[in-house]
Amino acid sequence: MRQSGLLVHITSLAGPEGIGTLGGPSRQLIDFLNAGKTGIWQMLPIGPVGYGNSPYQSSSTFAGNPLLIDLDDLVKDGLLSAAQAPLPPASRVDFSAVSDQKEKALRLSFSQSYSAVSALVEQFAEDHSWALPYAQYMALSKEFGWFDRWPLAAKRHMVSPDPQTEKTLSSLREEVQYHLYVQYLFDLQWKRLKEYAKKKNVQLFGDIPIYVAPGSADVWQHPHYFQVDRDLNPKRVAGVPPDCFSEDGQLWGNPLYSWLSLWLHGYDWWIDRLRCMQERFDLIRIDHFIGFANYYSVAAGAPDARKGKWVKNNGKLFFDHVKKALPDINIIAEDLGLINDRVKSMIAHCGYPGMKLLMFGLDGDENNGNRPENVPEHCVAYTGTHDNDTVLGWWNQQDRETRLKVLSMLNLKPGSDICDGMIRAVLGCRAERAVIPVQDYLALDNEARMNHPGTVGGINWCYRMQPRDLSDALLQRMRMLNQEYRRAEP
């Protein structure tokens, strides 16, 4: 079946809470996709945002982002006395303002309603082994601050239980309950959203970062699965080597895995992580898939990624375990980057669909695998991703000669709408699934770009749609394109 999808993160949706939520804004988008014959909604990771508000640097790979909880739905459920005053309409997400308002509302909901649902919250914690450790981690973070400032005994507590830390957690019992309550609310609203999407024939397409954030709840609970020292400080960290885009490479800083330890334990942590994602999503993109074949390792504390080294990894063995434990999981491999023979062999062994980006296929090389005519059926095709320029932003940077070559390659006349032309090229290729970022449908320039890799803060992750963006004109256009290129859902 040929399908089409829209790439837009939940945080980017319009709504009264200063950020997109799991309630009305998400249901409105699902209705829009259903009417526009678009069967896939792809989003970024949904965990709590971390440093620089990045969804790829989360405090937990299992927990949900509290900022996405819909307050109006809490009021309708009788879990909050009154909705908060709407934040002023804005073209950017003000994470600081949103966080302040959301936390006040959620703590009010907790004080008003926890006793009424405490049994359900306790059952939620029993059903999810990550939930209580995560709540304890968040409570200790409120008490001690950033993880690197924690007392050493508290850092080591999950491996070597400490009486003083137990005493501290006992005094923080209500704070632990609060974080369990928030995760219960997120789970409640997420399940409703997934059921709503299913009724509307829209598949939810999630994103799982390959690495976890340093000092995260995952490292605290399972330090033996990471390359950290006795005090849980990273010994080796992730990144990518210097290339034509960055002379110093990219130093991500995420702690690397101890793959031997994971293997000895049957990859149980990864299996649990993927199972959690499978319960939430119909399709799952694994970011930086090449890291399962070989990963770049840099000494912790290095000033840049110049002096790292490549380390071989046995991704074939790992995914054999995944397929045995989760035979029905639908994985998409983010196979962008340095694709050597080892990576190709692993991808072929796994059989997962990869990704093709039209923006990477316009260099004039007739053998480029990202050119529309070279795109295989078994993949997901894009104009670009959240890490790239928008189509219009990219186009505005090209010289006249490059533009003429691209127009010729796409069989477009000078003066043609480049956004429409590139969207049509992607929808018209052989790929089973074709996904278009919402910014390209809206013909927005780089002010609407979601992320600039290698940078922190600034305008990253802040893009936000406007209420007028989901217009009847766009709906009719998407429906027409999906029908024309045989991607309309039956």
Image: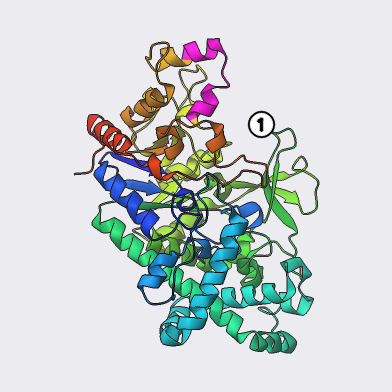
Which residue is nearer to you in this view: 50 or 160? Answer: 50
Q: Is any atom of residue 38 visible in this view?
A: yes
Q: Taking 226 as reference, is 196 left or right?
A: left
Residue ID at (60%, 67%): 218
- Kindly report the secondary structure that dominates the magenta region of the rendered protein: helix
Span of residues in magenta: 391-405
Total number of numbered discs in the rendering: 1
Query: Which quadrant would residue 196 be assigned to in this image?
Result: bottom left
Residue 232 percent across, percent down from the top left? 73, 68
Image x and y of residue 321, in percent: 45, 61
Q: How is the image coloured?
A: rainbow
For the C terminus, the image quarter is top left
Assess whether residue 54 is covered by the magenta stretch.
no
The reply to whether the magenta stretch includes residue 399 is yes
The three-letter amino acid code for the residue at tag 1 is Phe
> Looking at the image, which is closer to me, 407 or 220?
407
Q: Is residue 232 left or right of residue 436?
A: right
Q: Quadrant of residue 260?
A: bottom right
Vertical side of 490 occupied by 131: above or below: below
Q: Which residue is mark 1?
A: 245
Above or below 264: residue 309? above
Residue drawn 55% across the image and 22% down it = 396
Q: Residue at x 52, y 30 (%)?
A: 445
- The N terminus: image quadrant: top left
Which x, y percent locates residue 95? 59, 55
Residue 42 x/y as whole percent: 41, 47
Between 190 and 160, the one nearer to me in the picture = 190
User: Is residue 49 in sight in this rendering?
Assistant: no
